[in-house]
Image (cartoon, rainbow, N blue to C red):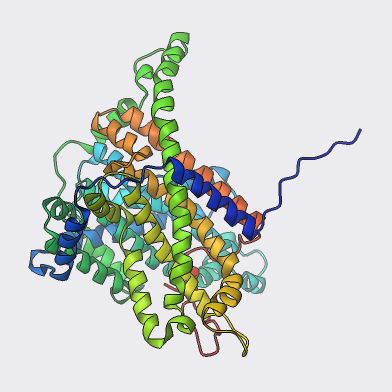
Amino acid sequence: MTVYGLRLPKLGYLSTSNLFLLTAIAAVAVADLTVSALNPWAEMRRLVAGLLQPDFFSIEVMSVVWTVAFAVLGVALGATAGFLMALVFARLRAIRVLAAFLRSVHELFWALLLIQIAGISSTTGILAVAIPYSGIFAKVFSEIIEEADLSAERVLPAGTSLLARFAFVRIPELAPQFWTYTLYRLECGMRSTLVLGFVGLPTIGFHLDSFFKQGHFAEAAALLFCFYVLIGTRRLWARPATVPLLIVASIFILPESVGNASTLTNLIRFVTHDIVPTPLRDADLFAAATMTNLGTWFWPIFAKQIVPGVIQTLVLSQIALVAMAAIALLAFPFICRRFAGRIGQPLGRVALVVVRSTPEYMLVYVLLQLLGPSMLPAIIALSLHNGAIVGYLMGRHADALEYRPDAPRGINLYCYETVPRLYGQFLAYVLYRWEIILRESAIFGILGVVTLGYYVDAAISEIKLDVAVMLIVATALLSMAVDAFSRGLRRRLRIETMPTRLSEAPSETRLGGTLAAEKAA
């Protein structure tokens, strides 16, 4: 008897793109894209007027300092923990699963949980960044270790210990790449700490939240410009030589905690009572009635919160993913010298850097004020932010291409020479950003967009921490599933080895289009 195996359909660049496009079109049919604001244009005019007249005297200097301090300490702690996990990442599946879970839960969710333990404190701000970043660093550092050149180990004497091999061969080879990625991650850390201000921590976001609610757009504009200056000058003040000084200074200028409750007492209560499902508290775990009560408790959460939250999160992220891809394809020529020229290229780069430096959460916050509550502000913010990132990266790859002497110009160069040669790299970036977009989509529920975060915020507001943790675990599992599916697609399309991070893109080009040998910070 002949047994025929199940063969998966072949996937190519075109079929994959069409599949995502059709899914996004189907998602649009069920998405809430209404504009409910009474007069969005009037609010937009007030916002623009404030941006044109920033009030720099209103800036609370310490909020800027604490934004940097939380980012420096959070990234430093996350990088240290991630490095330790990276050493055994390839050998221990438990570490890989742990790292995947840690990075799948957004910093805001970690902050909301940590506030229950440490209150509005420096500990909360630092750990909210360090915990998810440790999972990110573990994955990235392990990839750097696996891809390292090991030829230097051949000259070591026989019997050299593993520790000595790593210290004298691996570390000198890997240190520059570790530093490069860590310093780039500091930029992401500052965006994260800004957003933490929206849940009460004393960073720039705390004052932005206050200014936007009161309609003080000139003051908000000043803080935004200050933040852009921080991001734009990061390479000047955050260098390998200055990082130890930044860490020490950040420790000494941390703000005082709000409240005097014991963190240890709160932690014990949180672990042993608050996050334990209500039917299991002080119950006989081996009794049949306990399991029945647990099922009765869990089913409404699953049916009325997890399932609709997952569906809405997927709908929002799928539309934003395709919109991001379209924006990236349209935007990258504006930073490519062959298309934008010597004058247009710097202007295009500045515009894309500003957009990608603005946290999505803050963009959604502003757009909700202008357009009203719906998925539309979240889709616009996600697509603009991530489209600027991918467009910026694609432009740098386009500048590194070598064109034949008789290459066409203008639209023909774009359609027939540049995009076909970069499309594999483009898909690699899009699939990599997919999990990140989904992760961001979930947290917008805190602002009122009906995703998984909406139910998480409601549960925390009602002090149902057991329900909140259950919903956060569901968010993490969804993110991990999409990440695994994305990696599988990249393998099937044979693009899994292409660069997917900002720090791996070409850093500069030379005349003739040859690629520089260094990586971007």
* Residue 3 occupies quadrant: top right
Above-or-below relation of 270 to 287: below
**Observer-nearest residue: 394 or 13?**
13
User: Percent x, y for residue 444?
Assistant: 33, 45
| Residue drawn at x 20%, y 36% as measured from the top left | 262
Q: How many marks?
A: 0
Q: Is residue 259 left or right of residue 270?
A: left
**Observer-nearest residue: 241 or 302?**
302
| Residue drawn at x 56%, y 71% as measured from the top left | 419
Q: Quadrant of the N terminus?
A: top right
Q: Quadrant of the C terminus?
A: bottom left
Q: Is residue 84 visible?
A: no
| Residue drawn at x 20%, y 44% as measured from the top left | 120
Q: Is residue 130 left or right of residue 332?
A: left
| Residue drawn at x 36%, y 46% as measured from the top left | 33
User: Percent x, y for residue 319?
Assistant: 45, 50
User: Percent x, y for residue 372?
Assistant: 25, 46
Quick one: which residue is furthest to the left in this view? 57
Above-or-below relation of 440 to 166: above
Q: Is residue 295 left or right of residue 115?
A: right
Q: Is residue 292 left or right of residue 401?
A: left
User: Percent x, y for residue 61?
Assistant: 13, 64
Above-or-below relation of 388 to 432: below
